[in-house]
Amino acid sequence: MSSYKFKTFALMFIAVGVSSCGIFSNDKELPSGTRISILTEQNTQNAQTSVISGDSFPTPIINRQWTQIGGNASHTGTDIHTSNDLKLLWHKNFGDGASKKNLLLAQPVVYNNIVYTQDVNATVYAFSLNDGKKIWKQKLKPLTENELESGLNGVGLAIDNQALYAVAGYGSVFALNRENGDVLWRKNIGSPLRAAPTICDNKIIIQTLDNRLLAFNTQSGEEIWKYNVPAEDTVLAGGPAPACLSEKNLVVAGFSNGEIHAFNADIGYPLWSTVLINNGHVNLATDINAIKAPPVIDDNTVYAIGHNDLLAAIDYRTGDNKWEQKIGGINLPWVVGDYIFVLSNNNELLALNKKSGKVLWQTSLLTEYPLEERSNIYLTGPIMINKNLLVTASNGIVYEISSTDGQIIHRRDLEEPLPLAPISAGSAVVFITNDADLLVYK
């Protein structure tokens, strides 16, 4: 259990530029703060000063389920509705947290008011979303000692109306009974796994560390198709969950060699491929070709960002680029309405017009820290809630940022490392900490 100060549930809260309402409860006097300029960093993308109209976003909806990475198989975002007075509802520990050997990679999923988590040793837990009552836990054991030593064993979850699916880093995929955690079937892949699964049209799609893409039947675990892409020696921890859009019978996956491929979802036939590598960059820190951010399929376009400084909008039929920007990142872009919100490798949150690729605003984050300290902090997100964007930092900071102009509205310190972006379902916002603590706000 972490050293969280849960007796009073007291959290440090700092307001920065309180020009609009935030989503967290404000029940005490806030210390004053200073608005952070949206164009303070070098290497900006020539952001315009235009302000996005809040009316241009879809009507906020209550997200009933969060079934997989991005909330759905295509990873398309939405404006999620919650209370504007969120308070900590409950917290629970769910096993073993991150260590020098193991990273906490698995984002929770929510289905029918149950939140499911996976710790670093691949143990899966189920809790009531309403009160935090533990319903069951299931340890997913490797078959051999060699598998146990592979590390990063808890990799990711996905869920549908048939089962909960869990990926273990040592190379196995499990289908579990949602009600009690019993194993329905198990598939041994034979290669380490580092990416969460995607569920689409009775298929579970898995990507291996050595760049194999495989599709299995969700009911039986039987293999449907597979495809191999050349492996890369240098990779990033974690990996991108493939995107799938059933209406177009399309699967899109990014790989550690910088390639992005599209497939016929039914048979795995390759449709096109392209490369997300900015050959003109001069930043050695981003000289890794890997794609870690999951791609997004939205309407007739695939949006994808690579670590090697390239963000692109790609025609889903041909694989041709509609536009590209020299922006690199490792987080899922949030595509909603006519806009894309994305975190860059330079700790910037950017808003772009999704049709033209024009940068509308750009906000530098972590500027309150010295540069040396900043280099040890990483950001995750964004996710849109009540027309504002949440971005989390690995040192425990949660930024709430206006989607219309990039102003930082609030800055909250949860005082514990946050390895992953939050999720939202059932009007709740769910965080996990590096110590494997589950925090539910509602």
Image: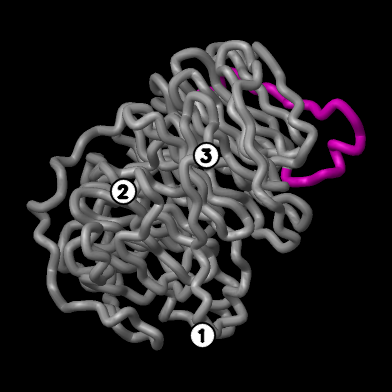
Where residue 230 sits: x, y (%)? 69, 52
Query: Dividing the picture into quarters, in which one does residue 363 lie?
Result: bottom left
The quadrant of the picture occupied by the N terminus is top right
Image point 48% across, 80% down: which residue?
Answer: 369
Give the residue pinned by disc 3: 270
Where residue 171 sits: x, y (%)? 75, 34
Query: Dividing the picture into quarters, in which one does residue 282 lie?
Result: bottom right
The verdict on residue 149 being magenta is: yes
From mark 3 to mark 1, how far is it between C-alphas? 47 Å
Amino acid at pointer 1: Pro
For marks 3 and 1, the one nearer the N-term is: 3
Give the residue pinned by disc 1: 370
Give the residue pinned by disc 2: 301
Image point 35% across, 44% down: which residue?
Answer: 317
Amino acid at pointer 2: Thr
Where residue 252 sits: x, y (%)? 47, 42
Residues at badges 1 and 2 in contact (C-beta under 8 Å)?
no
